[in-house]
Image (cartoon, rainbow, N blue to C red):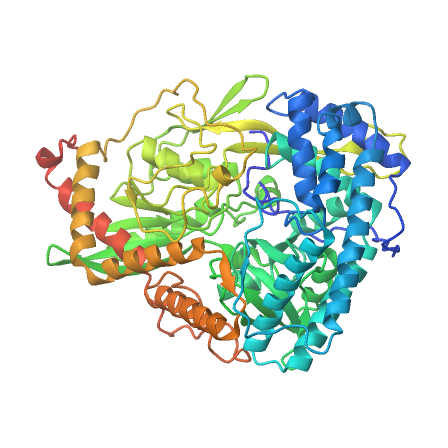
Amino acid sequence: MKKYLITLIPVVLLGWQRGPVQQNAIVTTETSLSEDIKPTAGQYKAEELSSRILSNYHYRKTKLNDSLSSAIFDKYIDGIDHGRLYFLASDMAEFEKYRYSFDDFLQKRELDVPFNMYNLFRKRYQERSEYIQTLLKTPKPFDYTVDETLNTDREKVAWAKSNDELNDTWRKYLKSEALDLKLAGKADSSVVKTMSDRYKNRDRGLSRIRTEQVFQMFMNAYAESLDPHTSYMAPTSADRFKQEMSQSVEGIGALLREEDNYIKIVEVIPGGPAFKGKQLKKEDKIIGVAQGDDGKFVDLVGWFVDDAVKLIKGTKGTVVRLQVLSADALSSTPPKEIRLVREKIKLEDSRAKKEIVSVNTGNKDYKIGVIDIPLFYRDFEGAQQKEKEFSSTTRDVQKLITELQAESVDGIVIDLRNNGGGSLTEAVSLTGLFINKGPVVQVKEGQGDIQVETDNDPMIAYNGPMAVMVNRFSASASEIFAAAIQDYKRGIIVGEQTYGKGTVQTLIDLNQWAPKETDQLGQVKLTVAKFYRINGSSTQLKGVMPDLELPSAFKVNEYGEGSQPSALPWDQIASSKYESANNINDKIVGQLKDKYKQRLKSDEELKTLVKTLDEFKKARENKIVSLQEAKRKVERDEAEKKRAALKQLGEDAEDEDEDADPKVATEAPKDAKKKKDIYITETGRMLADLIVISKEPSLAGAKKK
């Protein structure tokens, strides 16, 4: 089996690597904002090699042309000024003449225009910075009694026609930020000082930007126009990637990126402090960091990710406190404070775990075993050395199944919610625990070759009733497993449509293509293959559709592959030959849906959950916030009520109490009562319904086994 990168994010790889990775020293140089940044000789070579690799070896085989140039142009502009807060309409009119020339730049090793565009951004940034500091020096920069609003969604707004128009937009943004600080209890003088320091830090951050960061932004405009999982990594970014792969970082256990002036969480790493505390989630924004239990918060808004990481990382055993805006927060929601103890990522903390829940249906109690799998892990090095107890998802789950059977459970639920992927080997072998033997997934390479990954072990660890729970953030290897269980008609799939990440990546070190080159050229992460279900349908874009869909806090294309404009399309290939278990069929699923619909009408918890989620989704669509203090406070209170209602219903069932004392240790006592997870409860009911229906095969039209 070939080793590919198949995860949703780069950190969770096919194999867990041991030991620290040496990291090259990062040289940080400050430049005046009026001083131009210029490309290096090595970057011209990296441009040539990257363009050749991306044109010839990417799965799409997309040649550089005017159409692709236009997409690269738009993505590059978006990468520089996503919020349309710096460039003027006149700047864009001047740039427009290059829209169909970016393909020529890449083919001819030209970098002057992309760098000139970025250098103009630095000039525009300096103009805005001067306005900001001038405004903040006025005696009373903001009048909170004026009834005005701010539209926080600037993705499709027109470019400002004048500096005055931009200044007014910035005045409103600054007022909104200041109002957040004021409502958090800061005095007016403290608000202004915090704001002034915040933007001075941003100025220092931009002055430290290096030529390789500009080059990486330009090359990624090309790479990500091909598909969202292809990218170019400059040398220092490649070093950070290696460190993330090693899992040796002492910190909070989260991958970060900068976006729209915020530090965002790309992924919470299983086994880290953030994962164990269940307090941080993908897409959360970190806006402040403090050291220890008594340290003052440093404002992170406007920081670059490299600088933010230096504050968040630290010595094992030390405390770091974060101010966080939740991903699902409404526009007026205040930040929450989180306390974490730094430590190394521990694989054992991300291993599969079990619990037993009791559900009642038809006036009968059923014991349902739940196995939570946070990722598909495998210690490849330990396996190669034939260690007796090397880490393996399949081995761990097999043990848990044996324990659950000994406790006489009536059925088993495999919980893959928020599982971003991992080892393809484990996805295949785990499927084998529930089927006789046969194909699990097909891998089609760019040249058209198709490889079928197969479970050849006829042993079945569990042949009883089963369900697989998935959500929007179940991706890659999780989708492979869920799809196989669905195609074999082995169990029911419950939850949300999955992420739709059905592509395969590999890493290419550019210096391998230029061995005599003395400069470090970076790496290309390249999409080279796609995954297909055994029925021939791709998991790309569409993911896995659940048999029974649970209420969701998100719209279908709000997150996931479908939210990415450059995502590879869904398609089909020929089906593999396989023999389904026929435990599930359309009639059974229809009956399960009918019973679920009845509960949606009669069960008060479910009715309240659906109503609350609908209200929450509707509220999140509103991107207009008031800049009048009294109205903003009302908006904020309403947002908090909606979020509290979700927490009460178990939407964040494993979260700790956000109102608890942050100095209290994050790990609850073993005998502490766990908050009810309504999604697990309902999935258990569905599985219990399946058990009842399966006992009457004539009603469902199932084949008797």
Q: Is residue 328 above or below residue 223?
A: below
Quarter holding the N terminus is top right
Say which quarter of the image contains residue 359. Answer: bottom left
Residue 397 % position (x, y): 41, 49
Q: Is residue 65 above or below residue 401?
A: above
Q: Is residue 97 above or below residue 475?
A: above
Residue 648 % position (x, y): 34, 68
The total of numbered circles placed on residues is 0
Instruction: Give the camera-side residue of 376 and 336.
Output: 336
Q: Is residue 111 left or right of residue 507?
A: right
Instruction: Give the camera-side residue of 571 and 487.
Output: 571
Q: Residue at x 82, y 45 (%)?
A: 119
Quarter holding the C terminus is top left
Residue 206 % position (x, y): 79, 55
Q: Residue at x 38, y 63 (%)?
A: 653
Instruction: Give the camera-side residue of 657 and 419.
Output: 657
